[in-house]
Amino acid sequence: MSASRVWLRQAKYDLVAARYLAQQDAHHFYCQTAAKCLQVVEKSVKAIAAELTDRRIVTITIGFDHDIDRYITAIIRAPHRPAKTVPHYIVETLHHNRSEVKAIMRLAPHRPEDRNKLPRNTEYPFHDVHGILIAPADTGVFQKAEIDTHVKTASIVFDQAQALISIAEREPR
Amino acid sequence: MTTVVSIYPDYLEQVKQLVAQHLELVEEPLLLAIYYRTDRAENDVFLLEVLDNFNGSSIECDGDLLEVLYGSTPHFMLRDRDAVLQIILASPEELLRAATKNTSRFREVKHALAEGRAQKVYGSPEGDDLMQVFSNVGVACMAASGKI
């Protein structure tokens, strides 16, 4: 099985987990739901990057970092391809979703610039607007409407990644 | 004057080999494959594939069936250097929706079948059932049975 399909398989079960957690409708699960959505998006983009690397359209080393914006940047800078070809669909899809993907990926924990102003994220304690250290699972940190949006974004990105990899696999080899 | 290089069904054997490859792609199982010729691009090779678990509408927003262009490769040689292999991909639901809306790409397959310039190269039992959508009577029956 190709690397892209393995990334996609894990993304699929991350999405199953995100939906399951969202269905519990419990505020202390909102951060975990968002974290799973983030994982879906990350792995879906990495699956696409893996497929393009396998086809030598781009050369990207798939790492364990959360910064998928660099993957998207590399992919959308690939040489222009005619409309309705596989690379064209990939670039257009990633370009179209970039702002939604960035919004969800901002929730990934990352090294802060100021250790006294840890930003909101899905996993680690951070500082609220009053500078008080709070937990992502605390009440009010994440809202249901926001989580529903993240689940929807993750679902769309996963579906798109699956469709893009499917059309790439259908090239005569 | 345009020279028509590809005359259907010249690429039938290559199409069959390609479809055989696609049968191995198990994540989106192939249900139906139809090789056909269109009026709009006589030199191109057209292949409709209906796949289970596929969501073409997630990346194609023009409201019609997803159309993907592939150039000539060593594994699918096209005699005309400007010709392309065009694979139309859809889930059963997307195909039925296209039939209901009578979209442009759906009509191309339907007319090709009616005019004898299309043939089914693969059909699972579900895929064979889907062939009904290409007849007017079939669409009516499927609507009556709630399938569309």
Image (spheres, coloured by chain):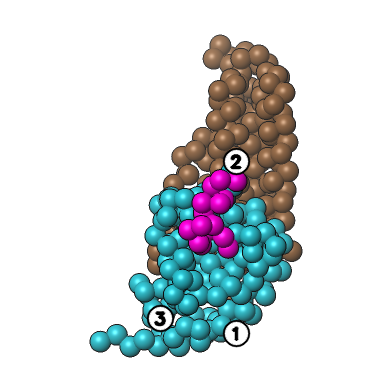
Chain colours: A brown, B cyan
- Look at mark 2 in the image and give the residue it sits on: A155
Q: Nearer the viewer, mark 3 or mark 2?
A: 3
Measuring from the top left, give residue A102's x and y in whole percent: 51, 39
Name which residue type carries label 1.
Answer: Glu
Q: Nearer the viewer, residue B102 or B145?
A: B145
Q: Quick check: B84 left or right of A111?
A: left
Q: Residue at x 47, y 50 (%)?
A: B100
- Residue ID for mark 3: B43
Q: Main secondary structure of the magenta part?
A: helix
Residue at image x 51%, y 57%? Answer: B137
Magenta segment includes B90 = no
Q: Nearer the viewer, residue A78 or A81?
A: A81
Q: Chain of mark 1?
A: B
For disc 2, the neighbor class at 10 Å (few under 14, some 14 to 19, many from 20) is many
Say which element carries label 2: helix
Region in magenta: B131-145
From the top left corner, tell me how far across and down residue B85 is, in percent: 48, 75
**Quadrant housing residue B129:** bottom right
Of tags 2 and 1, the one toward the viewer is: 1
**Amino acid type, residue under disc 3 in the picture:** Asn
